[in-house]
Image: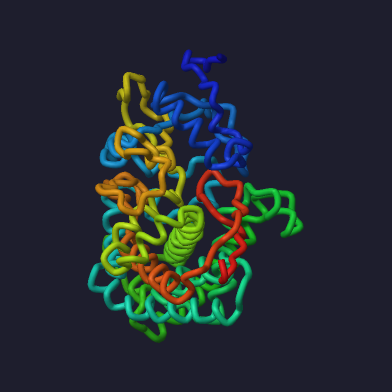
Amino acid sequence: MTTTADDREVDPLDLSSLDFWGRSMAERDAAFAELRRERPVSWHRPPEGMVMPSESDPGFWAVTRHADIGHVSKNPKLFCSGQGVQFQDAPPELLEATQSFLAMDAPRHTQLRKIVSAAFTPKQVRRVEDRIAERAERIVDELRDHGDGDFVQLVAKRLPMGTIYDLMGAPVEYQDSLAEAADLLVATNDPDVLENLGVEDPLQAAGQALHALLGPAHELAEARRRDPQDDLMTNLVAAEVDGQRLTDDEIGAFFVLLSVAGNDTTRNTIAHAMRGLTENPEQRAWLAADLEGRIGGAVEEFIRHASPVMTFRRTATEDTELRGRRIAAGDKVVMFYESGNRDDEVFADPQRFDLARDPNPHVGFGGGGPHFCLGNMLARTQLRQIFTQLLTAVPDLTVGEPETLRSNFVHAVKTMPCSLEG
């Protein structure tokens, strides 16, 4: 082993390389299982990404156990978000334009989250549930008319895209291009994506995506100032924090964050869950036998199994200790949700796709604490509705091998063939 300047051993399992994140989920699972078993808190070199790590960046601590992910998440004063939440480094201007309250600490995080949370209360989710059900039914009807094709394009991406932009108030004619830009923003480490764009620089690709999101966001904000509507953008332009209205930059960052969080996570859970049902026909039959009674629990397993968001980081605010490892103030601490959701101290037979799993305390929406996913109820509603439609209207639907995105942030499916006849 090599060591860092302060004698912290760099772990032989390299979670920092993009090659690691290009491996299959089974290969990554094996690596995480070793870490959980032998080195649940381990030290690693800085992660590869769109920006080369600075010489002053020593690396990060990897947290792979379910309990430790919860501990870090629920102690924001000790493990803060305000110094960045992304696994890999990015230019400050890009972070400022994309992360919004995700990368803030109290009290400002609390104030800004409260503004947005009004759109995600149980009452509001119930208000849009009928629209989600109608959209899910329409998507599956159009799938039946279309026939075989790419499940991601025909089904998985369409429901979350429409739902989040309806909440924001974005015009229907902009929604496809906005969703494409949101996808691109988290795909800049994938060489195929860059080749298709005709660019070599991940930063250039991220800049293009950001421009495509911020322009419509600012236009929509100005439109809602002139003509308020019953949507989230109207709430944002009218809101005050510390007696001041949000700036266009702050509103734009909200819009970008919700575009990514609202689209990618649910979309990829839908794709991975459909693959799980195809590979496990006995589980599918069990669910279909009592769909209404079992779909709620099945959704939790869909989320655990998919682990759509794989990493977030925090920064230690003071010297502390975790699993016997001494963590210094200023050290980066990265939570690996994919690993936490396979922890055999919490989940029996964690590799099994088990729709009857109960309890199922997954960390698919984070490990708790103030940054727990704001849209979790909305995501659950969408998953219930789309799979209710799929399992009743196209009961013989199967999907093939997915083509996954090389990413150390989202567990994304780029394409996946589907057949309506099994």
Q: Position of residue 199 (x, y in %)?
A: 74, 54
Q: Nearer the viewer, residue 261 or 103?
A: 261
Q: Check the picture and name the quadrant holding the N terminus.
A: top right
In the foreground, 83 or 123: 123
Give above or below for 344 relative to 147.
Answer: above
Question: In the figure, residue 169 lies in which quadrant?
Answer: bottom left
Instruction: Between residue 386 and residue 207, name the one nearer to us.
Output: 386
* Position of residue 18 measured from the top left corner of the image (x, y, whole percent): 61, 38
Above or below for 262 versus 368: below
Which residue corresponds to the image point at 49% horizontal and 77% vertical from the top-left? 139
Image check: 321 left or right of 389?
A: left
Residue 131 vertical position relative to residue 326 in the rendered view, above or below: below
Q: Which quadrant is home to the C terminus?
A: bottom right
**Residue visible at 40% across and 32% down in the picture:** 63
**Looking at this view, is 58 or 8 the one in front?**
8
**Residue 253 coordinates in the image, percent (x, y):** 46, 61
Farthest residue to the bottom: give it. Answer: 227
From the top left corner, tell me how far across and down residue 393 is, in percent.
45, 76
When asked about the image quadrant of residue 35, the answer is top left
> Compared to 325, does 313 lie above or below?
below
How many tags in the picture? Answer: 0
Left or right of residue 74: residue 272 = right
Observer able to see residue 111: yes
x 38%, y 71%: residue: 388
